[in-house]
Amino acid sequence: MSHNHHDHHHHHDSSQSMGLAFLLNTVFMVIEFIGGLMTGSTAILSDAVHDLGDSIALASAWLMEKKSLKPADSRYTFGYRRLSSLSALLNATILVAGSLWVVGLSISRFWQPTELHVEGMLALAILGTAVNGFAAIRIIRKTNNLNQNVMRWHLLEDALGWLAVLIGAIIIRLTGWTWIDPLLAILVAIIVGSAAFRSLQKAYAIISQQSPEPELYDTIKARVEALEAVDSAHHLRLWTQDGESHVLSLHVVTHEEITSTQYQALKQELKHVLAEFHIDHSTVEIEYPQEVCRLDKI
């Protein structure tokens, strides 16, 4: 019935920000490996391995984000926007798994502490907080969908992790309490892992075509059935492509057979109702009272 076209300028800016975040993360990952080898710090080397996973995740998210901007074609008739949600699902899974790995590694360090080179930790922590913080801020300013939100948490995890390293290094230098390092790492992993798990749930909801909001289905149905010419509404299908672009299909039964003029008036009323709920693409089939719905036979 209707199809609204959106300006993709914000999505393009977001894609560029993700590309910059990927490049910054990759460059700093190399610095981490070199710094970890030079300082002999297994903590920094562990972060470098983690950032390697982040770079792979950012690269896949960036590519998926760019591909999701392609228009619909004969093969992907709704367009490629769902690829962004697929990327979010995969990367949120990586982030949850990475957080669990950090927790496991940190717990083992309570009983098997590693030698910490505080001066090297301080220098890399300041640089790491600045680089990852800048990249995360760029993503936050351009966040438009779930995929970008997951990438934001990837970068925030790194920034918070390095901030924890910085705080921990200062405390260790002043007190000699080496157990502060794994404790802070666990706290950061719990915060980021929890947020990533919520994003994972949202991505699954989109991929499995759940209704965008639990109450939206009943609200739309009630609004349509409140129209004067409408007797009932059924076979309402409501889903979202990426958490932003919603799609709807609906069968509407009139009180009686209507004229062409009344038919056009009903279409306009339905358009106005659906516009209230930001439905980007809708298909509505209007039926008469005695008409047998073809879907009832299925």
Image: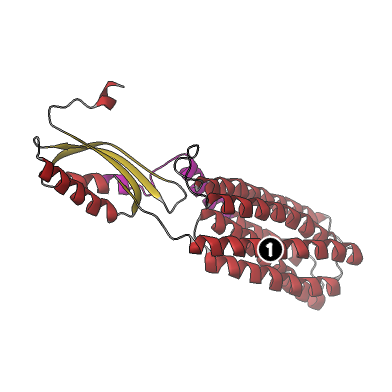
Q: State the quadrant of the N terminus.
A: top left
- Nearest the viewer among 48 and 172 is 48
Tag 1: amino acid: Asp
Residue 143 in picture, x, y percent from top left: 52, 63
Classify the position of the C terminus by image quarter.
top left
Task: Out of 166 and 263, give the one closest to the viewer.
Answer: 263
* As drawn, 238 above or below 163: above
- For disc 1, the marked residue is 158
The residue lying at 28 percent from left, 26 percent from top is 295
Res. 42 visible in picture: yes
Q: Residue at x 50, y 56 (%)?
A: 145
How far from the left and from the top, in percent, is residue 199?
Answer: 53, 52
Residue 226 can be seen in this image: no
Question: Left or right: 123 with respect to 138?
Answer: right
Stretch of the chain drawn in magenta? 194-218
Is residue 231 rendered to the left or right of residue 56?
A: left
Tell whether 189 sits left or right of 145. right
**Residue at 19% over, 25% down:** 292
Dot 1 lies on which element?
helix
